[in-house]
Image (cartoon, rainbow, N blue to C red):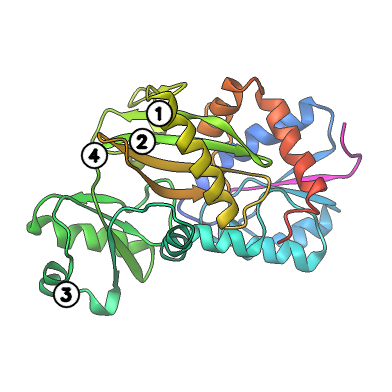
Amino acid sequence: MLTGKKIGVLAGGTSAEREVSLKSGNAIFKALKDLGYNAVFIDASGNLCEELKTNKIEIAFVALHGGHGENGAVQGLLEVMGLPYTGSGILASAVAMDKIASKKMFLHSGISVTPYSVVSRQDCFKDLIMKSILFDMPWVVKPSAEGSSIGVSIVKAESELEGALKGAFLYGETVIIEKYVKGKEVQIGILGDRALGGVEVRPSKEFYSYEAKYTPGMTQYILPPEISKADYEKLCVSALEAHRALGCKGFSRVDFILDGDGVSYILEVNTLPGMTETSLLPKIARLAGIEFPQLVEEMLRLAIADGGGRA
């Protein structure tokens, strides 16, 4: 065992990804208990500060997805309380969650992103959008700060734009419109300072939607991805570059689209990816010879070694 300190597994929360987070948190909590750790499960939907104090938590294992748990806010609370925690620090969490900010960081680091345009609620006029976007349909319309493909739509005709924007604006004041790139979606897992490998995601529908992610049988997972060795190696290198560009720590999952010409485009970096035993990062880790309990323990070890996610 790495520590005799009391560990609080923070899950649930109040974001649109609450249910997924509860599943991640329960899987992590079970793994820690099975390994013999003194762990407590905490639903972070109430007074988190009070819960941490009442339970005398000494290390936080963050299993929150979306919202305050993934945008740096909870990390800031933990820093103020002086508690070490798993995963990335305040700044990396905030930038990774903000798709506009992260795209700028990727471009600055020479990592390709799909052509995109940003639309704010007050400037949301269909005629203006149609004239200002310089790339052809289909478009991907998504909130600028959500995960799990929540609020994401594919627009193939002008008549579909209004509904897609309405759905995306349910989750924030700013929306991104990206050029839809047809290709293979490959997700690369990062642990510590190395790329573990990746998984190719093949949804039965047009894209890897929330439904496709969490409905059994709707998506195939190919491990390792059925792409060339050269493309695979390039994606692993790019994933590690993206992880470092945002200043991430501990672990992440980096998502790409690889088009038919072998050109890759980064979609996002997930600083707190799903952590059920069937989630993608655990699948990738298992491919690399790391079983789920050992993955959880290594995340904890990295939190201690890195000074508790602080950055």
**Label 1: which secondary element:** strand
Q: Of callouts 3 and 4, which one flags the residue occurring earlier in the amino acid sequence? A: 3
Q: Residue at x 86, y 45 (%)?
A: 6
Q: Residues within 10 Å of mark 3 (few under 14, many from 20)?
A: few
**Image quadrant where residue 22 sits:** top right
Query: Residue 280, position in %: x, y?
Result: 51, 32
Mark 2 residue crowding within 10 angstroms, few (<14) / some (14–19) / many (20+): many
Quickly name the residue at label 1.
200
Q: Which of marks 3 and 1 is nearer the N terminus?
A: 3
Residue 194 in the figure: left or right of residue 278: right
Apparent side of residue 159 relative to residue 74 in the rendered image (left or right): left
Depth check: give the residue in front, 35 or 246. Answer: 246
In the rendered image, residue 244, in percent from the top left (x then y), is placed at 60, 52
Q: What residue type is labelled 2?
A: Glu
Q: Residue at x 14, y 75 (%)?
A: 128
Q: What element carries label 3?
A: loop
Q: Which of marks 3 and 1 is in front?
A: 1
Q: Which callout, 1 or 4, points at the residue further toward the start of the chain?
A: 4
State which region is magenta: 1-12
Q: In which quarter of the image is the C terminus?
A: bottom right
- Tag 3: amino acid: Phe
Residue drawn at 13 percent across, 70 percent down: 126
Q: Name the residue under label 3.
A: 125
Q: Do the residues labelled 2 and 1 touch (CB within 8 Å)?
A: yes
As drawn, 217 above or below 90: above
Q: Is mark 4 on a helix, strand or loop?
A: loop
User: What is the distance, in whole Å, between disc 2 and disc 1 at their CAs?
Assistant: 6 Å
Tell me whether the residue at label 2 lies in contact with that at label 4, contact meaning CB atoms closer than 8 angstroms: no
Calculate the distance from the C-alpha at mark 1 to the C-alpha at mark 4: 14 Å
What residue is pinned by disc 2? 185
In magenta segment, residue 189: no
Tag 4: residue type? Lys
